[in-house]
Image (spheres, helix red, strand yellow):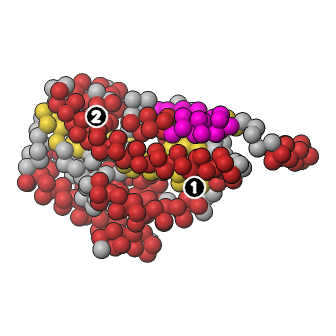
């Protein structure tokens, strides 16, 4: 067995043009702009390497469930994958700062926050043998409900869909009852009455045909959370220099393209919600005040539990 492995390794080194087929699990569906961006990224890698590196995207958690994608890349079950970055906040709060309400709410702020966050995220993932390739934000997160929400009190008692710990905390502080539901399962969760309200992007609202189960949407623009694409470092190190360069170049292009796609969808998908009959309304001053109060409490909690290096991300972003 040992000799077989050495032999295989020798062949791999001797023939760098040997084609590699990689499986890449992602959490969101094919209509999601993140998935489309990733598909384009893999097309570009395939083209630039003359098919030497052929990456197959497995979207919507079809190969590996969202919660297990990071671990699967870490253990080399798969060489590469995508996930929602702030889901890792239970490992270190540095991962979760982009999902704290009203810290960074514009693309400009989101970019500055990512600049501040990236070195620490790179270091933390590096300790697990992972290397970030690119990270792309969702449009700012808005509020979906049946009927207009005039104050935070109107959220009281609602079964509220959550996708990470921060949103769970948010819902709880609003007096709502959080229920974790993956994006792909949103329509079913609403139709079965498991949830009756949510905070997510206009992109995810459209992708899940929100008009089938809610009547109102308010662009509260509470936070701009990101997905991240990571590669296993040993898998990456096994590639030829040319292939590595092609992957890094395509990743840089994908990051830039992804941020542009996100900004375009912030507007176009909000329009699509309205075109499909959802009432889009600006939040009242009272609602904004109440939401900001929840955000302030959450940030106090975050600061009380964050490491010094996580805290320094926030202070370097705020200065
Ligand atoms: N869509 C994803 C994450 C954030 C977003 O806008 C979701 O709702 O699960």
Q: Which residue is denoted by mark 1 in the rendering?
A: 131
Q: Is residue 78 left or right of residue 209?
A: right
Residue 219 in which image quadrant? top left
CB atoms of marks 2 and 1 within 8 Å: no
Q: Is residue 225 above or below residue 310?
A: above
At horizontal 59% and vertical 46% (from top left) the residue drawn is: 246
At horizontal 16% and vertical 31% (from top left) the residue drawn is: 274
At horizontal 47% and vertical 54% (from top left) the residue drawn is: 88
Q: Secondary structure at mark 1?
A: strand
Say which label, 2 or 1, has the lower sequence index.
Answer: 1
Magenta segment boundaries in residue numbering: 41-60
Numbered tag placed on residue 262 in the rendering: none
Q: Position of residue 254 (x, y in %)?
A: 46, 45
Q: Nearer the viewer, residue 156 or 118?
A: 118
Numbered tag placed on residue 205 in the rendering: 2
Quadrant for the C terminus, please.
bottom left
């Amino acid at each position: 067995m040992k000799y077989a492995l050495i032999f295989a390794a020798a062949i791999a080194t001797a023939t760098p043009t040997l084609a590699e087929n990689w499986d890449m699990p992602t959490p969101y569906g094919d209509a999601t702009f993140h998935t489309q961006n990733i598909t384009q990224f893999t097309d570009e890698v395939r083209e630039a390497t003359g098919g030497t590196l052929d990456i197959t995207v497995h979207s919507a958690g079809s190969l590996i469930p969202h919660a297990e994608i990071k671990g699967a890349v870490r253990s080399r079950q798969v060489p590469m994958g995508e996930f929602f970055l702030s889901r890792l906040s239970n490992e270190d709060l540095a991962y979760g700062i982009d999902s704290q309400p009203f810290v960074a709410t514009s693309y400009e702020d989101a970019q500055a926050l990512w600049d501040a966050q990236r070195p620490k995220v790179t270091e933390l993932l590096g300790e697990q043998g992972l290397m970030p390739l690119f990270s792309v934000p969702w449009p700012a997160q808005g509020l979906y409900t049946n009927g207009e929400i005039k104050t935070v009190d109107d959220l009281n008692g609602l079964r509220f869909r959550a996708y990470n710990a921060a949103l769970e905390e948010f819902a709880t502080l609003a007096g709502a009852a959080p229920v974790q539901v993956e994006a792909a399962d949103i329509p079913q969760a609403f139709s079965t009455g498991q949830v009756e309200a949510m905070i997510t992007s206009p992109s995810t609202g459209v992708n899940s045909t929100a008009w089938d189960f809610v009547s109102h949407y308010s662009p509260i623009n509470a936070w701009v959370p990101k997905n991240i694409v990571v590669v296993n470092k040993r898998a990456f190190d096994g590639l030829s220099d040319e292939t590595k360069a092609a992957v890094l170049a395509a990743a840089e292009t994908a990051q830039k393209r992804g941020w542009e796609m996100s900004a375009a969808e912030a507007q176009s998908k909000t329009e699509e919600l309205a075109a499909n009959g959802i009432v889009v309304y600006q939040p009242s001053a009272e609602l904004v005040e109440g939401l900001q109060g929840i955000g302030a409490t959450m940030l106090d909690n975050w600061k009380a539990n964050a490491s010094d290096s996580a805290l320094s991300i926030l202070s370097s972003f705020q200065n």
